[in-house]
Amino acid sequence: TTILAIESSCDETSAAVCKDGQILTNYIAGQAVHEQFGGVVPELASRAHMQHIVPVVDVALKQAGVTVTDLDAIAFTQAPGLIGSLLVGSCFAKSLALALDKPLIAVHHMQAHVLANLIAEPAPSYPFLCLTVSGGHTQIVLCRSPLDMEVLGETLDDAAGEAFDKSAKLLDLPYPGGPLIDKHARSGNPERFAFPEPQIPGLNFSFSGLKTSILYFLQDGKRADPDFVRKNLDDICASIQHRIVTILLHKLGRAAKETGIREVCIAGGVSANSGLRTALKEMGERRGWNTYIPAFQYCTDNAGMIAQTAWYLYQAGQFADLSVSPSARAEWA
Ligand code: ATP
Ligand code: MG
Ligand code: FE
């Protein structure tokens, strides 16, 4: 069974091909156009998707060594995401499915982030917990089987990726700032500056207070020394990253304790963060968990995870009708 999957929920246009659940290729085209605006501009994102979609699919098929006639199904990201971006991928997928008379598979982007953990061996066994940390979401998900997931907790305001990106913006770092905070943090002292940990009940998160405390902290620092940020950048980044990571892992630890589950994964763009990856491994060793982290290419937005999810949907016979439309928000199936 050969499936072509398309991802276009935000600002990466990506196409992947999987054969019997094995990813043959995962091709991703980013969009540099947003850098100058310090964030993703939705209208520009959909235009870039329109320019990229045909060549991206073409490259993916060539890399996989298949032609459209070899395809058994076409999958696409249906929700959640930027509506204009989602429309490009969904229209393309629907048109191709119609032209080839092949089944269509609609994929939930956040479920796909979780299932990115099943692409490589060893894969977690069920049930497992997944901390999904991306640009728009922060969720603790209980996964009982590929198509049976439940959100145990999520952010009440900013996502973890936003916390990284907004902190980076306050430090005058270019967008997206998450990877740059990670880079500076490697040579900084994480204990140098203490930022508060929000007291949020249960398994939910909040990051907006952290952003405010960083803003005041930087204002105070600059008042004392206009060069404060430049002189202390590595330590500031390390301290911010340390706080975000400890907020995330405290709640993940709590979820593991409450559910008794010891199979623990992370997913989403922020799971590329080296501080989070290291801290998760250490915590797993301390607590006797088996921990899993997707390969870098499957952390940020990619069609490989869409293909992986589509393979489970295909086996379950869950196909979409050609009348399906994308949605910016998504109910958790
Ligand atoms: P969603 O999946 O919620 O719709 P998204 O798809 O835009 O959002 P991803 O592509 O999964 O999000 O992740 C992008 C986020 O990951 C950005 O906020 C980016 O700063 C962050 N990120 C990527 N690499 C790192 C890193 N090394 N350290 C910290 N943050 C990172
Ligand atoms: Mg992106
Ligand atoms: Fe994403």
Image: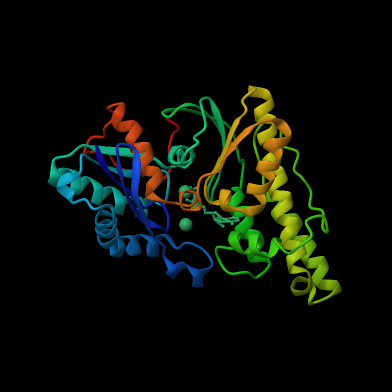
Looking at the image, which is closer to me, 291 or 245? Answer: 291
Name the colouring of the figure.
rainbow
Residue at screen point 78% across, 56% down: 190
In this view of the protein, can residue 72 be seen by the observer? yes
Where is residue 304 shown, x and y percent of the image? 38, 47
Residue at screen point 30% across, 51% down: 89
Q: Residue furthest right?
A: 224
Instruction: Establish if 267 lies above or below 29.
Output: above
Residue at screen point 66% across, 42% down: 280
Which of the 4 image quarters holds residue 256?
A: top right
Q: In the rendered view, does 167 fall on the left or right side of 8?
A: right
Q: In the rendered view, does 59 fall on the left or right side of 95?
A: right
Looking at the image, which is closer to me, 215 or 287? Answer: 287
| Quarter of the figure with the C terminus | top left
Where is residue 201 shown, x and y percent of the image? 71, 32
Instruction: Establish if 162 lies above or below 247.
Output: below
Residue at screen point 48% across, 52% down: 300
Q: In the rendered view, does 302 fall on the left or right side of 163?
A: left
| Quarter of the figure with the N terminus | top left
In this view of the protein, can residue 326 be seen by the observer? no
Which of the 4 image quarters holds residue 238?
A: bottom right
Looking at the image, which is closer to me, 330 or 130? Answer: 130
Which of the 4 image quarters holds residue 42?
A: bottom left
Number of marks drawn: 0
Where is residue 51 shown, x and y percent of the image? 29, 65
Q: Residue furthest front?
A: 122
